[in-house]
Image (cartoon, rainbow, N blue to C red):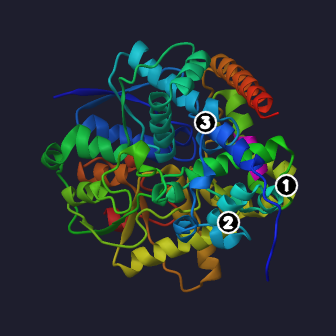
Amino acid sequence: MTKTLAYYPGCSLHGTSGEFDASFKATARALDLVLQEIPGWECCGNTAAHSINRLLSVALPVNELAKVEQDMKLDAVAVPCAACYSRFKTGAHEVEESEETAADVRAVVGRAYNGGVAVDNLIDVYHDAVGLEALDAKVIKPFAGLKVACYYGCLLTRPPKVTLADDPEYPVHMDEVCETLGCEAVDWNYKTDCCGAALALTEQGIVDDLVGRILTDAKACGAQAVVVSCPLCQVNLDGRQVEIAKKDPGWEGIPVVFLSQLVGRALGIDDKTLGLKKHLVDIMAVMA
Amino acid sequence: MATTCTPSASLSRQVTAGCDENAYKCYQCKKCTSGCPVARYADMHPAMIMRAVQLGQYDMIFDDRFIWLCTGCETCTTRCPQGIDIATIMDELKIMARAQGRIPAGTPSAAMLKLNYDSFVRWGRMWEVELITLDVLKRPTSVKNWLTLGPKMLLKGKINPTLKRGDTLAMKRMVQTAESITKAREAQNAGGQS
């Protein structure tokens, strides 16, 4: 059965993480999902807006939700970027919680948003919109027990008052998706620890520390690859290994793949479409 | 060493007026600090910031780099047993520090946030290549960070140099309205306090 979702790619998926965009769209096609990109979408405000202008940071995502609800007449939007997802969920939460905020946002957006759109992150799309059974039925090239550490990072589950995540300290939905693909999801310590996010632009030493700890634990717990669902987490966990290896000559790289690439590989989608060669630490050995 | 200070309620009042969070609920259990990924990299940490807000110690907060290292990971907010949205208080303190011109030296993240904001306000979408270029122009020492990773990412086709605009007119309208409503609220709050 075909299902239609609005699609909000966000700035990163049209910038440094083109392979996230391409692999997500390819898997959606294979899973009978129709994605309709929001016409003329704006930036969600990312990390900057909520520390500079609180009202704008709520209004920007709500404006997109109003477009989905009233112009596109759809009841769900897929937001694969974890940071954009967080802004969408926060925006919807804030206008629902406070009448004063809702009134201000209405003035900025120019119309009311009535709360009729579900916001799905990448894991929600595979785990719930498609469903594990339907996903399982489409797997034609399962992994033979590849050991993966599912890295959720910060904003897919936190804060739970906004995301309504089942277990924000030890989420398992991504693990369940990976196991449906034939992978073995390992238990580990750093599932929801922060990778340093945008500090990678200004405080590289701190990010190298944080990323080093996360990846060292993933390896210690037996993972052969780390799976992510956030463009910034991917760039940090993959890219900072270049610097980590300089400080620690014995460092053995660990591949950092997008969940959409892992799903795509199991669905039999070709390497080029999935952008498997765009990573700094080679992922072909684990994706073969 | 014993330290003393003269408490004042004004900072806590400003925080509550700005973001509707009550810092007085904090009883210093330090769960926020235990889980904070960047607490070890500054002199202050989340629980200290909360205490400084309660006591009105502006200098302790605004002279330290902690708030500018906060990544907004939401761990403190998630774990606070008192339900305080600590990450939102950090955002409010950043807004206040910027408004009062109290951004200390050695905090490039503060300028980066503004470059990022200006970029999506200008184009409707954030343009990564513009951010990096303006950062290098303003802060030439940062060029070495880009020289290590930039060429590798370019070779892999990870960097998309083209500008993709959003609906820039709609963005401009929303930014102007949001900024004027915010200013009016601030004036209202300032009037209420005097």
Q: Is residue B21 left or right of residue A177?
A: right
Chain of the residue on which disc 3 is drawn? A
Chain of the residue on which disc 1 is drawn? B
In the rendered structure, which disc, 1 or 2, sits on the residue that comes first in sequence?
A: 2
Q: Please tell me which residue lies in front, A198 or A35.
A: A198
Residue A28 occupies quadrant:
top left
Q: Residue at x 19, y 56 (%)?
A: A180
Point out the frontmost of discs 3 and 2: 2
Q: Position of residue A100 (x, y in %)?
A: 56, 24
The reply to whether the magenta stretch includes residue A73 is: no
Amino acid carrying mark 3 in the image = Gly
The reply to whether the magenta stretch includes residue B113 is: yes
The answer to whether marks 3 and 2 mark residues whose Cβ atoms lie closer than 8 Å is no
Image quarter in which the N terminus of chain A is found: top left
Q: Position of residue A217 (x, y in %)?
A: 43, 77
Q: Which residue is mark 1?
A: B139
Query: Tag 3, which secondary structure?
Result: loop
Chain of the residue on which disc 2 is drawn? B
- Could you give the CA–CA distance between mark 3 and mark 1, rounded to whole angstroms? 24 Å
Indicate whether A257 appears above or below A76. Answer: below
Query: Tag 1, which secondary structure?
Result: loop
Residue B141 occupies quadrant:
bottom right
Q: Residue at x 46, y 41 (%)?
A: A85
Regarding residue B88, the answer to whether it shows in the image is: yes
Amino acid carrying mark 1 in the image = Arg
Q: Which stretch appears magenta?
A: B110-116
Q: Which residue is mark 3?
A: A45
- Could you give the CA–CA distance between mark 3 and mark 2, rounded to whole angstroms? 29 Å
Q: Which residue is mark 2?
A: B48
The answer to whether marks 1 and 2 mark residues whose Cβ atoms lie closer than 8 Å is no
